Amino acid sequence: MTWNPYDNLPPAASFSLTSSDLREGEKLAMPQVSDVFGAGGQDVSPQLSWSGFPAGTKSFVVTMVDPEAPTVLGFWHWAVVNIPRNVTQLPTGAGDESGEGIPEGAFHLPNDARSLRYVGAGPPPGSGKHRYIFAVLALEAEKIEIDRGATPAYMMYMVYNGTLGRAFLEGWYER
């Protein structure tokens, strides 16, 4: 049985999430793999596009989590909050430390490595195949009132009751 961190949340509508850089159920390409964790990749966030979200959506959150990480709660690699409703895609590399690829008003939360950026897949050697779940959450609020130093786990707590819809795209990596 594989654990999905979204299974314990209240039901929400589904919508579509696609990428020109990755395909559902396929191995992540080296640009989306970590250099930070010594996996030989480039830590480049993938292009993401979403559509079909609920009509009442006022903002979005984008995340990436590894539920197979050797921790109690997985490992959050990326979180971007307060993406305006009129933005329905992030370009390749939007998760870099400059923040220039994310829309005005949106910002990165620190990932579990405590950096304000996307950190690619980097499972420990010999730990098997890890899933990487990219998610876009459609929210009923125009923005989340959250400290810029908050964790992705805390952000998920903050949107627990305000999520109208969720879209997922899952890849994997092993070394």
Image: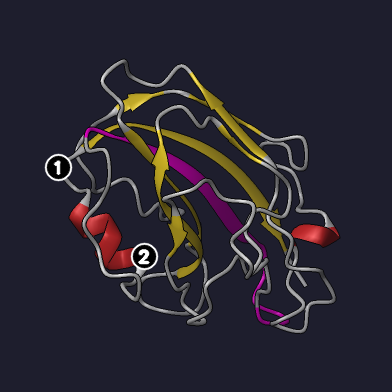
Query: Residue at 46% across / 77% down in the picture?
Result: 112
Q: Secondary structure at mark 1?
A: loop
Decide: is 152 above or below 50.
Answer: below
Question: Is residue 70 left or right of 123 when viewed as pictured?
Answer: left
Front residue of 112/101: it is 101
Q: Position of residue 83 (x, y in %)?
A: 43, 43
Front residue of 95/65: it is 95
In the image, what residue type sits under mark 2?
Pro
Query: Residue at 44% across / 52% down in the picture?
Result: 106
Query: Residue at 46% across / 27% down in the picture?
Result: 86
Label 1 crowd bin: few (<14), some (14–19), many (20+), radius 10 Å: some
Pick out the residue farthest to the front. Answer: 104
Toward which corner of the image does residue 100 lie, by quadrant? bottom right
The magenta stretch is 124-140
Query: Residue at 74% across / 59% down in the picture?
Result: 32
Label 2 crowd bin: few (<14), some (14–19), many (20+), radius 10 Å: many
Q: Which residue is mark 1?
A: 161
Decide: is 152 above or below 2.
Answer: below
Decide: is 65 above or below 101.
Answer: below
Query: Residue 152: which numbered mark, if any?
Result: 2
